[in-house]
Image: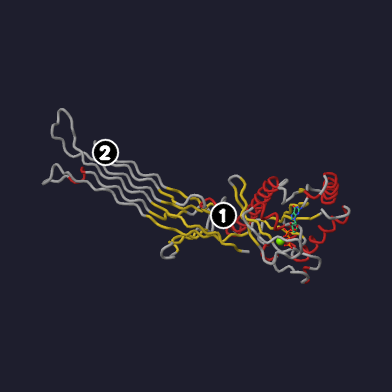
Amino acid sequence: MRFIDEVRITAISGHGGPGAVTFRREKSIPFGGPDGGDGGRGGSVIFIADEGINTLIDFRGKKVFKAEDGEPGAGRQLNGADGVDQVLRVPVGTIVRNADTGAVIADLKKHGEEVVIAEGGNGGRGNINFKSSVNQAPRIAQPGLPGVELVLDLELKLLADLALVGLPNAGKSTLISSISAARPKIADYPFTTLEPNLGVVTLGERSFVVADIPGLIEDASIGKGLGTKFLKHIERTSALVHLVDVSWCLDEYEAFEQYVTVRTELEKYSEDLALKREIVCLTKIDAMTEEEIKKFQDFFEEQLDKKVLPISGVSGRNIDQLKALMIKCIDMAKATEKEKRGKNLDGIHAIDEE
Ligand SMILES: Nc1nc2c(ncn2[C@@H]2O[C@H](COP(=O)(O)OP(=O)(O)OP(=O)(O)O)[C@@H](O)[C@H]2O)c(=O)[nH]1
Ligand SMILES: [Mg+2]
């Protein structure tokens, strides 16, 4: 599932500092020669791809990014300091276009890749550089070159980090609308969601992408309901969040059956998907008594031999805990993947040495 995150920003590199027009002034040397130093270089605007960033959300608030101007040169041959670069960290996969022409300026594919998008202007040369046999006291210096101002379109194809799965009506769309800006249709009947929705979730400094997909039913794997056609979109997610609406269930066995139905379909569809980490949430707990919640939670935890989280997308209860758990899950999945990649590289190395 692809979702395009787009922002338009203005990048301005720094103006080069002007060179100085100054002359040596010392008691012993009444007519000293020129000693004006050069201006510093303007800072550049530089993009760096960072795998720790998932979305372009950081660029939504601020729109203009300016590097520092170079400092002017000064007397006594002092050169001005260079302007500080404006470094913008963007997610791996970000494409940078010139908004006026549509031309691709950068396509940042690898972690750590660095591209200078707008070079700072050169500093001007001070008058010390213009001394010649015919002009011993030049009153000229260069002004320093201007920076570049570019309007840029940043584009990122987002991949979902997590997917919400569950039976129709489990509260998936309600949850995504309570944790992100996504506003999918929510209604009191099954199969409200016909197409996947993506939402960007933020917690503190972090952000990640959650997919809300249509509900699964028994025999979805053989085409019942909307079938499993949307599951291919979530094959690359780090983990699943499985929502089980237990609020209407008569007892814990009926509740757990809801869970098993969806797991069976996931397993039939793909082993990879079924092996993904899974956060299990019991939903709509605002409609239940504390006693009921505990009864269902205890039963699920005993059956699954892991913690489950009761939540309510409507009242917001335990939603922050869920977000924190989501981040933990993504990080763990990424660490495992990295480890696997490392092992594969070791394998190649060993072959090379043979
Ligand atoms: N009381 C309560 N009702 C909820 C909660 N979450 C969802 N609902 C209600 O449950 C119904 C279904 O919610 P949706 O979010 O559309 O469920 P869904 O899982 O996206 O359903 P499909 O798209 O059909 O798969 C709606 O009437 C919601 O208002 C909750 O936390 N508490
Ligand atoms: Mg829905």
Which quadrant is the C terminus positioned in? bottom right
Which quadrant is the N terminus positioned in? bottom right
Q: Quick check: which quadrant has ligand 1? A: bottom right
Q: Is residue 121 left or right of residue 188?
A: left
Instruction: Give the residue number, with chain letter if any, for mark 2.
Output: 74
Task: Tell me, for residue 34, which label it has, or none.
Answer: none
Mark 2 and mark 1: Cα distance apart in space? 44 Å
Q: Nearer the viewer, residue 136 or 184?
A: 184
Q: Nearer the viewer, residue 119 or 227?
A: 227
**SS class, disc 2:** loop
Q: What amino acid is labelled 2 in the image?
A: Ala
Q: Nearer the viewer, residue 327 or 112?
A: 327
Q: Is residue 127 left or right of residue 316?
A: left
Q: Is residue 188 left or right of residue 348?
A: right
When the figure is inspected, residue 247 is found, relative to residue 39, above or below; the finding is below
Instruction: Give the residue number, with chain letter if any, for mark 1.
Output: 55
Q: Is mark 1 within 8 Å of ligand 2?
A: no
Residue projecting furthest to the left:
134
Number of dots carrying numbers: 2
Q: Could you tell which of marks 2 and 1 lies nearer the N-terminus?
A: 1
Q: Residues within 10 Å of mark 1 (few under 14, many from 20)?
A: many
Quarter of the figure with residue 225: bottom right
Q: Nearer the viewer, residue 335 or 284?
A: 284
State the image coordinates of residue 282 (x, y, percent, origin top left).
78, 51
Identified at 40% across, 48% down, the residue is 67
Q: What amino acid is labelled 1 in the image?
A: Thr
State the image coordinates of residue 241 (x, y, percent, origin top left).
72, 55
Q: Is residue 65 left or right of residue 335?
A: left
